[in-house]
Amino acid sequence: MGALTAEHAGEALTVQRAAYVTEAQRYSAPDIPPLTETLDELRAEIEASSVLAFGAWLGPRLVGAVRGRLDGDRMEVARFVVAPDMQGRGVGRALLDAIHDAVPATVRTLWLITGADSVQNLRMYERAGYRRVADRKDSVGVAITLLEKQLGH
Ligand SMILES: CC(C)(COP(=O)(O)OP(=O)(O)OC[C@H]1O[C@@H](n2cnc3c(N)ncnc32)[C@H](O)[C@@H]1OP(=O)(O)O)[C@@H](O)C(=O)NCCC(=O)NCCS
């Protein structure tokens, strides 16, 4: 587990695209934002001072990543991905723990969105202390659920 920096942008894009294909298939939505994000957009975001970015490596191989987008007293957990062949082995949980441990003290609320029918994701987030707060449609019409976790620090 470590900082994801601009030099990892290409690998991170590859893992992200691979991980999100299953979600895109689930919703018949190939244009979900994690799949349309460009390499330049990804690189710019992980270089931004308002973004925390972590990667998980197995030897030299990047197998997972996550970003935290800071905005005042809120932080969005985004682009949370693990390579398809490495899912279900605890890599995601470790990434979520890493980003939770790095949250600045000024942040009171963590939030994220996930597909409304992504049952495994919803269960994982609820076990990690997130609560469902709203359902809506995203920019490409996919039903999504907004979850939040209040921090006590
Ligand atoms: C969601 C994701 C990052 C979780 O990473 P992971 O390494 O598979 O997760 P872990 O092995 O640490 O398991 C943690 C939890 O994730 C759940 N999970 C979610 N998606 C899973 C998947 N595809 N395979 C296995 N477990 C999955 C597990 O049930 C587990 O739940 P539990 O803690 O309640 O038992 C990963 O499955 C992934 O990249 N999925 C596709 C992209 C995506 O949906 N990202 C999140 C968008 S909000």
Image (tube, helix red, strand yellow):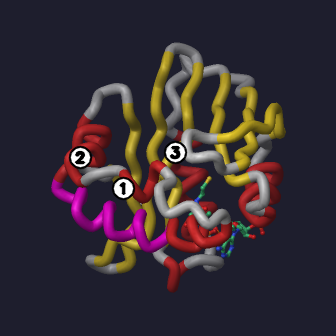
Q: Position of residue 143 (x, y in %)?
A: 72, 48
Q: CA distance from mark 3 to mark 2?
A: 14 Å
How crowded pointer 3 is (Cα within 10 Å; few <14, some 14-19, many 20+) is rated as some
Q: Foreground residue, 149 or 144?
A: 144
Residue drawn at point x = 51 percent, y = 14 percent: 72
Question: Reading the chain from its start, which is encountered first: label 3 or label 2?
Answer: 2
For label 1, the SS is strand
Q: Label 1 belongs to which residue? A: 2
Label 2 packing within 10 angstroms: few (<14), some (14-19), many (20+): some
Going 58% across and 73% down the picture, which residue do you hit?
22
Q: Amino acid at mark 1?
A: Gly
Q: Position of residue 141 (x, y in %)?
A: 64, 46
Magenta span of residues: 7-19
Give the residue type at disc 2.
Arg
Dots 1, 2 in contact, CB < 8 A: no
Image height of 42 relative to 120, above or below = above
Q: Is residue 33 above or below residue 50?
A: below
Q: In this rendering, is residue 153 above or below 52?
A: above
Numbered label attached to residue 43: 2
The first of marks 1 and 3 along the sequence is 1
Residue 114, position as x, y percentages in the image: 67, 50
**Rendered-image quarter of ligand 1:** bottom right
Residue 127 in magenta stretch: no
Res 78 label = 3
